Amino acid sequence: MGRKLPLKILSLVILFPMLFFSCGKKKSLEDVSLESDPRQNVNGLFPEHVSIRTMTQSYCLYGEFILSGGRIYYKAPGDEEWSLFLKTGLPHSSKINPFKRFSAPEKIVEICADGDSLYAFDDEGFLYVCYLNQTELLTPFEWKKQFGFPSDDTLHQTPEAAKKRAWSMGARRSEVLWYEDIYGNQHHFGTMGLETVYFLSEDGKRIRFTDSGLPQDFSRSIETPLHGTFISENISASASTLFVIGSQGRMFTRLIDFDTMGCDPMFFQYTYDKLPQTMTGSDYLSNYSPWALPAEDWMEQPKIPLSGEARLTRFISIAQNGLGNEARVLRVAGLDSEGNTGFYYKQLKDKSWLFAPVNLFFSDDDFLDYKKSETTGMQEIVLKGYITKNGSVMPEIECEINGLGLHSTDDCTVTLRKGNDSYTCRLYLVEKWTYIKRGDPGYDGSTRNYFITAECGFEGLQDADEDFAFLIKDLFAQKNHALFAISGEATKDYVQLEITGSDWNEFLKPLTPINSYMMFFSSNPQTSIQPAVSKYFYTLSLPILKQSVSDSLMLENEKIYAEDDKEYVERIIEENRLYLKKLKDERKNYKEIKDSAEMSRWGYTTLELITRVTFLNHLNFPKIKQMTSVGGDLLETNVQSLSSIVDYLDWSYKSVEGLVKHRIKRYSHLLDSIEDGEPSSLNGTVQPSYPDYYNLVNLPFHAVEKDADGQILKRLEMIDFIPYFPGYYIQNADGRMILVMLKDSPSVIDEYLSEYTTEDLAENPLSIKAQFMSISFPSEKSLFEDLNDIRYEYSDGILEWNGTDATVWMKTAVFEKEMIFHGTEEEKK
């Protein structure tokens, strides 16, 4: 593709350590079963021509394709008869290249053709690609299963992706030749171009995408029209131009892919300014000229006027038919005013539609339902937060971020307030490239990492508070359209922005250091003081962790289980084992990815040294300067993001694993009794959550430590609002918070109750080993003053409970410990 080939060797130098380190450690794929939908055959069986592209019938510049009996049939331009594509109708390995062989699938269930490319998914959700035109770099009529970059792997529909409402593919290459940015500057497609696969979610509210130069996942997304409120009934794509239709016939188009949205600064120059350009898109070097951002927005298409018996269906098509952005023809299948089947059509920028009568076949469900709503509520994020300057919180400044949609290209506003003064700045965000395969960043505990460019003016600041005006100018005076001058990470629960202050003229302010700012916005004001605390608790809300307390993993505590229940008990045990394995595999996978990121950063550092010594980093042909200027930042972002995620997940996953392990142990004992012919029950030994276990021995939900005058010094609070967190937090008066995670607590409590009762606690206290994560803040009086004083410490210890008093000991040396809490249970007010 355009960004891949010129630096493929250079890229492999950077990424080789990652590829080597991850060899043989591929994440297992979840099973998917797909079937062709006969309702997609709107053109008929073996039609004279394919007029409308669907998931089983398609066309492009080099031919027409249909599915029948799980095989692909093909009709080349000018042919009258259909024939099996490449003789078998199934993807198969080339005999020429023995290193890329694969087993032929049993059947193909979905296809899409565009430009010079044919894409096909088999019944297990695996993708196969075949090019249809000879170029210097692409071999035609040869199937391949490899897709994506940098690993030579395949794209597989995840269970979530397989639930799509529709999908489509667009190939942007020599057939359109150039892309035109928002200022009309044309840019040659490069050497390979790209193919982008777009998936419309089951509810029609999200568009996920990947392309031939990205990792094999569906983690990237594009906002739907009307700021994400539009519900699409269908999607079609051609040469990176999307075409969607709603239930009431509104239609939108947009040219958007990973390169044009600005996400690929390693291979393209970008700008937010209108710069003159003399080259045209037919000039190869125009690929090297700056591409203007932001990417074009959705454009609403004229409505199709309907009268008489005219109706529209959800079946739509877009197809490239010339050079540049505007060479696209749109088609919408339906009925004309006399009830004849066919399609409405027009060129992308035409104002009116025409109708072409052809034999098409519709069911009642295919027609648009005008009673359905075409829009939904706003999906964008609004969060409040604070700002720090050189690590010190500025308590007089309020911050708010508004309008973030968590997409791969996005825009939002940031507002700062002090008293009656306020300032709002628009931010343009583009997602940073990563070679890591991801799930649903922003929603699954992992972050979306962004390059951010500000668009700001300073009208009205002359009347503002002097300190507030200086803060705004220090933040943004040199940031207007300064490319990617701000860095950020975001999830649905928090956003963090890193901003460097202005570099004031050293002659005007000699020796003045450049300030460093951080803004942190959170959905939970109780955890908004410290980013690390917020991020850790947000990982505990991941869906995979919530599954641990699902009824589907539980047996009834008081029920008597006998021989007739054996198969059911075995199934529940197996479900828990599979869930436990899933947890361990995911935790292991994150660790391996983190290690590979470290290795890859090392590889990049070596490469950067070589290019500096040889002065290659001053050359931008073939884009060496472009790649080395941002590569380090991208790889560093990968490492930092993964390191924090892995640390948080390690704590979170281990606590859930402990809960499930104990459950499996007790259920297995129950099964042993059943197999011995002894009907038995769990007798309350298995609880759904950690707080429920702690309730068995009356562990306090709330305890306080007081001084001689009755003043509260410390608080011990059970984290009962997260059922799978095993423990407490201690809040000290000096501002230090300590998370207390009790180790193997269900088994310890189980063992204690097998020998004692809660009435024995006074003479035989319960003792549970613990692990601590302590976070040191400044004193309460200066709680917001200096985040640089915060320290993270990890240590072990013990919690003791005698029925009335709770004591927590922290290990300070091999044979030494320190009492960090001793208090009495108190009813929480």
Image (cartoon, helix red, strand yellow):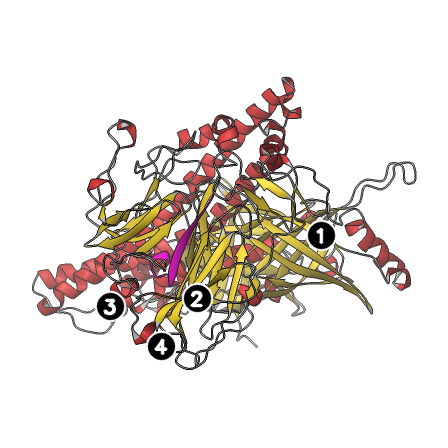
Decide whether residue 162 is among the magenta residues.
Answer: yes
* Residue at the top extreme of this rendering: 614
State which mark lies toward you, 3 or 2.
Answer: 2
Decide whether residue 216 is among the magenta residues.
Answer: no
Upstream in sequence: badge 2 or badge 4: 2
Residue 318 locus on image (x, y percent): 45, 57
The residue at which mark 1 appears reads as 454
- Disc 2 and disc 4 in contact, CB within 8 angstroms: no
Asked whether residue 706 appears in the rendered view, the answer is: no
Residue 634 locus on image (x, y percent): 57, 39
Which quadrant does the C terminus fall into?
Answer: bottom right
The residue at which mark 3 appears reads as 555
Who is closer to the viewer here, 259 or 825? 259
The residue at which mark 2 appears reads as 204
SS type, badge 3 = loop
What is the magenta range? 161-172
- Disc 4 and disc 3 in contact, CB within 8 angstroms: no
**10 Å neighbourhood of mark 1: few (<14), some, or many (≥20)?**
many
SS type, badge 1 = strand
Residue 407, placed above or below residue 694: above
State which mark lies toward you, 4 or 3.
Answer: 4
Residue 82 placement, left or right of 424:
left
Disc 4/disc 3 C-alpha distance (Å):
59 Å
- Specify the amino acid type for callout 3: Leu
Disc 4/disc 1 C-alpha distance (Å):
53 Å
Asked whether residue 107 appears in the rendered view, the answer is: yes
